[in-house]
Amino acid sequence: MLDAVERRTAHYARRGDPTAIFADEAGVDEDRCFDAVAGGVLPPAMATALARLHWCRYLARPTGAHAPDDLRTALLLFSRSGGEDEEVRADRAAVAAAAPGGREWARRLSDLGIGLHTRFERTGDPADLDDAVAAGRAAAGTALATSAVLGNLGGLLETRFAHTGDLADLAESITMIRAALRAAPTGHRLRPAMANNLSVDLHAYFQLTGDLPALQEAVEVGREAVVLAPPGHPDRGRNQANLGIALWGRFQRLGQMKDLQEAVAVGRAALALLPPGHSDRTARLINLGTALTARFERLGAVGDLDEAVTLYRAAVEATPAADRSAAPGHLSNLASALLTRARHTGSRAADLEEAVAAARAAVARAVPVDPERPGYLSNLGDTLHTRYRRTGNPEDLDEAVTAVRAAVRGTPDGHTSRGKYLSNLSTALWTRYRRAGAATDLDEAVTAARAAVRATPAGHSAHGVCQSTLANILSDRFRLCGRPADLDEAITAAHAAATTAPAGHPARAAYLTNLGVALRARYQHTGHPADLDEAINAARAAVRAVPPRHADRAGALSNLVGVLLADLQRGAAAQVLDEAEAAARAAVDAVPTGHPDRARHLIAAAAVRWMRFERTRDLADARTALRLCRRAAEEPATSPPTRIVAGFSWGVLAASTGQWAGALAGFETSVRMLPLVGWRGVSRTDRERLLSEWAELGPHAAACAIRVAQPSRAVTLLEQGRAVLWSQLLETRTDLTSLRTRAPGLAARLDAARVALDDADTVPARPLWHENTAQT
């Protein structure tokens, strides 16, 4: 009975629909409450619930036939509930004393709403907040409602939205504050605050719905709020800070540089108005740091990035240790800035380590229900992925995939950041596929990349990133599975990405590099010369667009080498060979020893030198090619598939010049890598596929051993080349009889694990392809 009454009043207070409180069943529920009470004395909770029912009836129809009765009954029951404090009781009495529907009545109701809101902040009782909104609505519903009354209702709805997440409250708040701003006369003291609140609400609405008109209005109203608060006005700094947030949101959505420049300018001005130690200073440090980081990414001014790192560190240091709600966000922002600096300088290992530590701390400090936690997880994944690309540690890559998967799971469809998280997940999975060769990773990467494109609207600043990432992954799946549709879709996506990055755009080099990779693949598949011509143009443009010391420069140069080699194979002139050699040398010089990608660039440089040898027959060129392949095969941080390619190339080139001992060393190096390619971390089918791609390694190595008169070594190499899977099968066939006697549960689990290892399966696939593509 009591629950039924409370549901009726809550529905009215939350939706403004009086049907439930005026229904005949409401009177029945009330009678049952009285009948259930012994001696006619209502318990406080029941008195409060019935008082709220009659009060809501009065608010919904203050001049109706039964309004005086509802008012008297409500006031009487509130007095008996024992839950009314003196301020709220006085506000209700003031409402009762005013003529219903008049200006004074509306003002008194609005005051009551503020009083109930104050009590809600003290007690946390959601019924107080609902009653405050109901009072505010009744006040705003009168023809004589003032701008203050309308604005107060907007504020109450903002508060309830913050606590419940009900989008209808936010939309109604926007409507009320718009009306309040229109009703406020020029020069009204509350106009600056109203304009600021409207801008904040509109930006929040955009973030939740992606509604671009709301974002556009947020910026325009935010500018108005700053104009309404001239220098010296107490609201100026707050209004500037919120305008900066709206401008940043529009820059992210549309990518217009003028919005970013204005966001930096107003962010600086807002920060300058606050002294050290002010409670709002930390947020402004973060906002300015975010805008400066983005400006660095667009314009490349290192001073912006250094300043951003300084601002983020100051924000972390200014956050009290007990403030768990703010600390994760500040740590995650610091991690992002440090990661950006590590990526773009290519030489600050300390930045990368600090970024990983800060990103981990952000995730650890965020409570599970924190709505920003998916963002912290995505940043952690991105940071670990980058460290993997520097160090080659597979544990970082696995942890990155786990973190970004969790970010995607925690983000609903329609959220403005979901596309970014999906793109990060697809990139991490793609990288892991390229290291370990699991086809399931590649398929999941394609699915995530397509979803990222769908979740990121055309015109969004991240749309090009998502398209380029999809192009990369589809190109690799074409090489794995041979489906032309994948390659055509890849080229379409790569073209779409390139169109989003005009000259001067920081991602232009990466997008053009990836377009060149996809076009070259199609040329190799179809032999259509126009594809190779366009690939060469794209690769050259990419090298021109990437800054000299940028971390992506080596990949752009190495891919230029690849398309130029294809051009040489169809008969290009000698100057193309010179261009390829210069690019190959620059690519190798651009990455330090120990970098996971260095071996790829060494292999490309070796291919150029061997091409020159085939044209000139100068043995010095052949020796250089062999030396480069050997260095690539011995790079410890490089993925096993790439080292196998390097060792195999070393062996083939040495054998071609009659250097059988050298050929044996190259092939033997690759044979030793086979167990790392066919490791148990991938499915049985993937292991069989990956190992079958190198079935000729053992025979080649054995032939070279026979050439140098080492027959026993030849037998050993043959066995090593073909026995990787057999040895793994034998390892899982250990007799468990004695273990079953002593620990039957453990034996059963081991048996189940053995079956799972044998039965794990994925789709059959074709050989891996080794080429550089730009991470975007």
Image (spheres, helix red, strand yellow):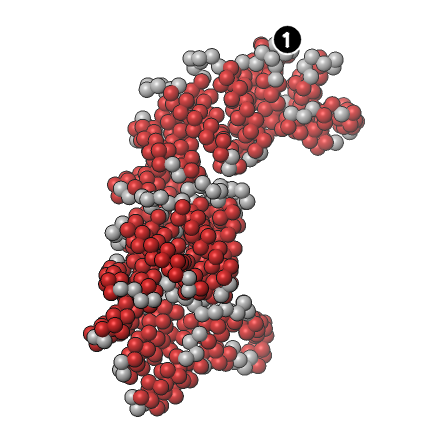
Residue under the point 67% across and 29% down: 11
Q: Tell me the quarter of the picture where residue 168 sits.
A: top right
Q: Is residue 218 above or below residue 573?
A: above
Whether residue 147 is visible to the viewer of this picture, yes or no, is yes
- Left or right of residue 306: residue 479: right
State whether residue 88 appears in this view: no
- Would you identify the image quadrant in which residue 672 lies? bottom left
Seen from the viewer's position, the closer of residues 474 and 28 is 474
Q: Position of residue 176 (x, y in %)?
A: 54, 22
Q: Is residue 68 above or below residue 51?
A: above
Observer-nearest of 79 and 182 = 182
Taking 248 as reference, is 653 above or below it? below
Q: Is residue 20 left or right of residue 439?
A: right
Q: Position of residue 726 (x, y in %)?
A: 48, 80
- Which corner quadrant holds the N terminus? top right
At x 60% / y 27%, what residue is drawn? 130
Tag 1 secondary structure: loop
For label 1, the residue is 99
Identified by mark 1, the residue type is Ala
- Viewer-proximal residue among 90 and 338: 338
Q: Residue at x 67, y 19 (%)?
A: 60
Residues 398 and 264: in front is 264
Crowd class of label 1 (few under 14; some 14 to 19; many from 20; radius 10 Å): few
Question: How many numbered circles are shown?
Answer: 1
The residue at 47%/42% (across/down) is: 458
Query: In the rendering, at what x and y percent does residue 564 appear?
Result: 31, 62
Give percent across and percent down for residue 82.
63, 22
Q: Is residue 452 above or below residue 71?
A: below
